[in-house]
Amino acid sequence: MAEIIFTAKGLEKQYWKIKTFEKCQALDGLDMEIHRGDIYGFAGENGAGKTTLMRIMTGRARQTSGEIALFGKSSVHELCRQRGRIGALIEAPALYPGMTAEDNLEVLRLQRGLAGRGCISEVLETVGLSDTESKKVKDFSLGMKQRMGLAMALLGNREFLVLDEPVNGLDPEGIIELRELLKKLNKERGITILISSHLLGELNQLATCYGFIHKGKMVEQISAEKLKKKCRKYLSIRVNDVHKTAEILQRQFPKLETEIITENRVHLYGFSGDTGEVIKALVMGEINMKEIKPECSSLEQYYMSVIKGGSI
């Protein structure tokens, strides 16, 4: 089992709206685990609490109650130290538009107390900005600014990247470039990455595991491998006796997976034959079958089923 580098237990965050004096709940008893080497896809609708969690994680905000731990440390003093191992890109990167990429990073290097300027050229090379030279940041494209923000997050050999909607506003080419860069950082440098996005299809290109958040609650954490199994072709069968149906299907198709979904619906995953075989087996077993149809679930469908408290 890989090292757990971030844990949240029972995390709550409340705040007051200044104009209405209304009390709001941004996080509501959230539990979360991130392991070393993960690319953790953090998905949820706008206002679900993703950015709030990331701000607490990186020290930009404090929780109302609950506990967090970074690299196994949870005391206030130790959390401050461990945050030095995190690089973050939350919302738009804070850049000096009239300065070059190198000069922006030099300011940050001095703020972080990093020795030597070699780290600057190294990180610019990593994100593909080494050829910008005297070009001012104000003249960068949006994609270049996002890579500049990533360079700032990486400066100082960070072990854990926290990225909030990093592909927002990028064109398809920019999204692909950033995706490949993140994969490279994870594979070649072993950097753990938490990436939030409302673009589930994009997360599907990157994530090794997922966390689905809804109204401040973590409704499911699941590995990419397990999610892939759930997002596949299956037969959806509506019957009068789901337990007996599941027993018959497991006996008749031992290499396939059977799952009881509701009190009257069973799924048979991976079936690619003639549905007549299934119908015959159930009729012989005296099952009253009301419906049978082939389905193929997507990541989007699975996500919607989870946040609604059901299953597909």
Image: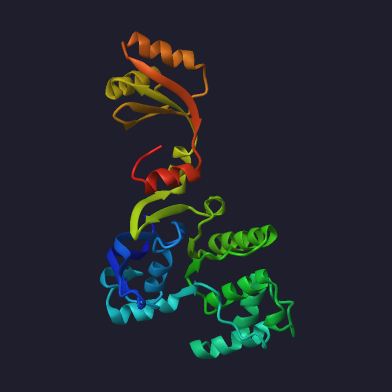
What x and y, as percent, mark residue 140? 70, 76
Question: Which picture quadrant has residue 287?
Answer: top left
Determine the residue positioned at 42% across, 49% down.
223
Question: Along the line of sight, which residue is nearer the eye, 30 or 80?
Answer: 30
Image quarter where the C terminus lies is top left
Q: Is residue 117 visible?
A: no
What x and y, as percent, mark residue 135? 74, 82
Asked if 145 appears above or below 266 in the picture, the reply is below
| Residue at the extreme front | 20
Asked if 51 appears above or below 104 in the picture, the reply is above
Question: Which picture quadrant has residue 155?
Answer: bottom right
Determine the residue positioned at 33% across, 77% down.
79
Q: Is residue 283 visible?
A: yes
Image quarter where the N terminus lies is bottom left
Q: Is residue 237 left or right of residue 12?
A: right
Determine the residue positioned at 63% across, 60% down.
175
Q: Is residue 248 left or right of residue 300?
A: left
Asked if 12 appears above or below 39 in the picture, the reply is below
